[in-house]
Amino acid sequence: MLCTDIDLLRWEPQIAAEAAFSTQTLFNGTGSVSGTTLTLASGSLSTARVRAGFIACLSGPIVGCFPIVSVDSATTCTLSVIYDGLDEAPPLPVSPGAGTDLAVAVRSFFPQRKIVSDLLSRMAGVEPGGSSEILNVEAFRKPCVLGTLHMIYSAMSTASFENRADLIIRAELYERLYRKSLRGVIAEIDTDGDGIVNCTRHLRVIHFARI
């Protein structure tokens, strides 16, 4: 996967709440937050297949969309607000506050991210699951984020009657940014599994040649 749900939150902090209909909703329930720990009142994160990197949408005393840094047990996970250092290893979560009787929904845009990730891989000449591998995956993060946001807002503009004009504008904006971001990407590809770059390929959509 070439981007994460956390990457999407950096561009659109409320995307998991605004586009709830187009997400995978893995869990709905109630819980409480103390420090950086979310504790569920009932249900199981394990059964719901919740993983680090997914998004917890909270409402009540705390309102917002927060990345799940780690799943610590069947009923507890670590949350954080979004900040630049969250990508560091190990991540240092920052508390979103404290509250009880919170409505909790855990969501992911995994299907959309998978579609765009596979498309970008194929544009680089790498078949997902094949023997070749893209080594500089970090270079693909931004195009994957922008392509995923374009897909999400396109779906929202089609399904929604409220704020449709605004959603269309945002979908078109992310499409332009996505296409622009592709121009500078050069894929470094390992074709034989030895971890060494064997070839490079440009992701330009259109190639011009003098005739």
Image (cartoon, rainbow, N blue to C red):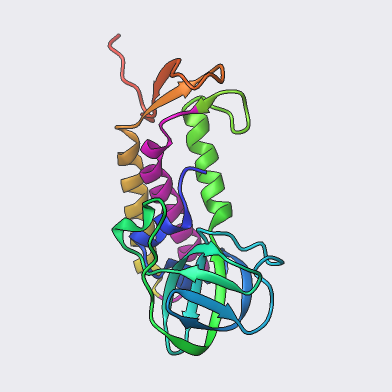
Q: Residue at x 31, y 57 (%)?
A: 85
**Relative height, residue 163 to residue 178 (above, below):** below
Count how many numbered circles sit on residues in the image: 0
Residue found at x 48% / y 65%? 156
The span picked out in magenta is 134-162
**Apparent side of residue 114 relative to residue 14 in the rendered image (left or right):** right
Horizontally, is 179 left or right of 31 in the view? left
In the rendering, at what x and y percent does residue 208 appear?
Answer: 31, 20
Q: Is residue 32 above or below residue 55?
A: below
What residue is shown at x 42% (from left), y 85% (from top)?
Answer: 98
Residue 62 vertical placement versus 204 (above, below): below
Residue 57 among those drawn in magenta: no
x then y, percent, for residue 110: 56, 54
Quadrant hosting residue 45 = bottom right
Can the viewer see residue 64? yes
Instruction: Report the residue at 54% width, 52% height from top.
Output: 112
